[in-house]
Amino acid sequence: MSIDLMNAFIAPLVIMVSISLILGLVLVIASRFLAEYGPCRISIKGNKDVEVIGGETLLSSLFENKIFIPSACGGRGSCGYCKLKVTSGGGSVLPTELPYLTPSEVVDDVRLACQLKVKSDMEIEVPEEYLSIQEYRAEVAQSISLTYDMKELRFRLLEPETINFKPGQYIQFHVPSTNREVVYRAYSIASLPSMAGELELIVRLVPGGIGSTYIHNLSVGDEVTISGSCGDFFLHERSSCDILLIGGGAGMAPLKSILYSLFEKGSDRKIDLFFGVRAKKDLFYLEEFERLAKEHPNFTYTYALSSPGEADDWKGEKGFIHLVLERHLKEGEKREAYLCGPPLMADAVIKVLKEKGVDPSNIYYDKF
Ligand SMILES: Cc1cc2nc3c(=O)[nH]c(=O)nc-3n(C[C@H](O)[C@H](O)[C@H](O)COP(=O)(O)OP(=O)(O)OC[C@H]3O[C@@H](n4cnc5c(N)ncnc54)[C@H](O)[C@@H]3O)c2cc1C
Ligand code: FES
């Protein structure tokens, strides 16, 4: 190739690369300075004002000021937990908020704090119970494998040294991520409120999952940060009828706390636990429940395998847990039901409970 021909190709290429680099630089500078909304004041009705730098979501801005709003999905706009009333400065409702807001909530200025960016001064209302959510430092006291993908972890609280919670509630785990932002994930508390200096979690490893991988890799003595307690799924005891606990997978955590709380109170209500897993390799706590059933004549437990392996020598129930429940539950029985597990499982169980005549106001659930 002649020098003239090479120049004819190289010169435009160099010009194009230079223009791209300059444009990229302009974009970086613009996003750093032009998208900056400067200092903004968030006034929390009946409480305090906080000064933040605009541009972050309302949820992150509040978290930075130690105001912990429940955010079970970690701010991904997929749980609808982070609802707050924004009475001024919030702008129009975003399409990403709409699936989680009822028409009356829209009229009432309810917004999803994780979707809304702070761009100007704002006036908001934060429910009283959220303002009492605290940040805790804790250290891993024990980490044991329950199955190939399920771990039970015990944490000792360092500062503050005790936590208040109701059996069934959850904490938010603060997970340090690679880009130095903190990622938040919800984990139900499996331990008893009376052991206020400790927290037990049961965590299933989600392949590639940020939070569950971090927690599974923790070792005894590691220090962690959490906030809590949160959630409206807890032992209500509004009725005195028999109790049903129904769950699957990591849904065991809040059910365990509820079950042990009932035992601790010396409750003589009949308690039936129905728990679904896929195969024998997913089973845990079998021996523990066998022992509990012997110690507490008012307690029974039924495990079901939805897809047992060929080598699984399983004489117990088989099939999805809602179908097992359907076979066991008598029509018209008065029950208080607590269920926790994947959304599809929970929806199927709720349908069975209603069909069997369980009062919907006695059905409590957490789906995850
Ligand atoms: C109120 C509440 C209580 C909870 N309590 C518990 C608990 O006690 N124990 C527990 O283990 N988990 C619990 N969770 C779920 C937990 O908060 C996390 O969502 C879960 O650990 C996955 O987070 P991750 O950061 O590991 O995965 P992510 O980084 O969030 O996700 C990684 C990938 O996995 C997918 N993914 C996310 N979750 C699942 C899933 N469950 N199954 C399959 N794929 C998934 C995502 O779509 C993504 O593609 C609870 C959730 C809620 C809302
Ligand atoms: S934190 Fe889940 S929707 Fe906002």
Image (spheres, rainbow, N blue to C red):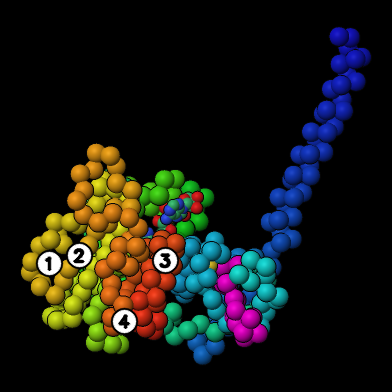
Whether residue 118 is visible here, answered yes or no, is: no
> Residue drawn at (28%, 83%), measured in percent from left and top?
334
Out of 7 and 211, give the one closest to the viewer.
211
Which comes sooner in the sequence, label 3 or label 4? 4
Q: Going by the image, does 183 lie left or right of 8?
A: left
Which residue is under mark 2?
301
Q: Amino acid at mark 2?
A: Tyr
Which residue is under mark 3?
348
Q: Cα distance, mark 1 to mark 2?
A: 7 Å
**Residue furthest bottom as drawn:** 46
Tag 1–tag 2 contact (CB < 8 Å): yes
Specify few, some or many for label 4: CA neighbours under 10 Å numbering under 14, 14-19, or 20 or more.
few
Mark 2 CB within 8 Å of ligand 1: no
Which residue is under mark 1?
293
Q: Amino acid at mark 4?
A: Gly
Label 1 residue SS = helix
